[in-house]
Amino acid sequence: MSSHPDTVVASAPGRVNLIGEHTDYNGGLALPMAIAQRVTVTLRPRRDRIVGVTSAAPGMSPAEFPVDSEPGQVDGWAVHVAGVFWALRTAGRVVPGADVEIKSDVPVGAGLSSSHALECALLVALDRQADLGLDRTDIARLAQRAENGYVGAPTGLMDQMAAMYGQEGCAILFDADQVSADPIPCDLPAAGLALLVVDTKAPHRHADGEYGARRHSCEAAARTLGVSSLRAVQADPVEGVLTQLEDEITQRRVRHVLTENNRVLDTVRLLRAGRIRDIGALLTASHVSLRDDYEVTVAQLDVAVDAALAAGALGARMTGGGFGGSIIALVDAERTAPVTDRIRAEFAARGFTAPQAFTAVPSAGAGVDQ
């Protein structure tokens, strides 16, 4: 194959975060896994300096914009594509105009990182087409730059690293402080287990503003503690750290981050020991912390978790940034239908929009398809 092919097809997976929520932007630990659902990008170079974008998804109108667009000049769903070209340009990379065709089976708005999958798939395609010589971490960082600097979302790096470093049969231990991604065995089918993902269809109300508020609160706490990030006090007794913070809300935010990092480490130890069933209690404890200390759940997420546990799930938690989106439930493989049915019944009883469910398995990361 030529190093400058006329057409490149690349794809990247969505992700489910097994545990470790709102830790990445605090220099912490997370344990995501890539899922089988993917965003596929077909890239064709153009001779002009224009990017044309089309999507097979309903309601996504075609868009065009200059390669050298600036933040604020593109809006709507195409902002993620424009952000990638901007991130490359501001990093000193030269790419041509292009026609970008997008197909996806990653549920949108479900907290499964469909936008990051799109950005990573496009970067993989541009890297191949323009022979940029990017490695997987380079691509993850560029996708984050697009989100932070162009889209305006203050996201960490976990989603992008999961999309780039995913492996079949493994979760990925992401260390935000070290910017590393290590595979951790997580063969759910071999253990007779399934990871049920339930998209609650709850709208993401005020998600961006609330997400930013949580991040700012943690950054302020780090300044008060005299450290660059909360990861620097991870080894200290949690209660001792909290006594140094006067604001009760900030104390709760910090308690979540520090205890969540510990839950990630405990989960990794269990997985390495082949004790997948035993991680259930840690998943549930994570949800309680996200509900009570970090306050990022909504009624649909809480109801779904409670219903899953009542139906026999080994553990359950919200996954993603919260304020809507999805939950995950660790269940015996033969219990997926009863757990799903119980959640649907509870949603119907409360007049919630019917949820959608599927099972997730650890899958491969981003790559060139052709």
Image (spheres, rainbow, N blue to C red):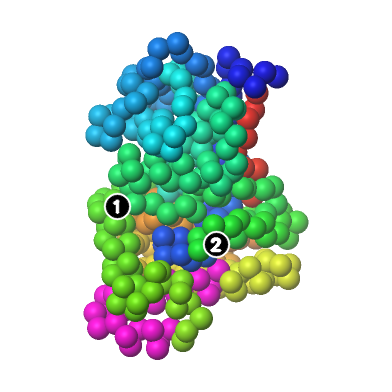
Q: Is residue 302 left or right of residue 197?
A: left
* Residue 319, percent from left and from top: 46, 57
Residue sitting nearer the eye, 123 or 104: 123
* Residue 7, percent from left and from top: 58, 17
Image mark for residue 96: none
Residue sitting nearer the eye, 57 or 15: 15
Please give the residue where the numbered disc 1 appears in the rendered image.
Answer: 207
On screen, 179 above or below 118?
A: below
On screen, 239 above or below 274?
A: below
Q: Any magenta on residue 255?
A: yes
Q: What is the chief secondary structure element of the magenta stretch?
A: helix
Q: Any magenta on residue 16?
A: no
Q: Residue at x 24, y 79 (%)?
A: 247
Q: Residue furthest front?
A: 92
Q: Residue at x 25, y 54 (%)?
A: 209
Which mark lies nearer to you, 1 or 2? 2
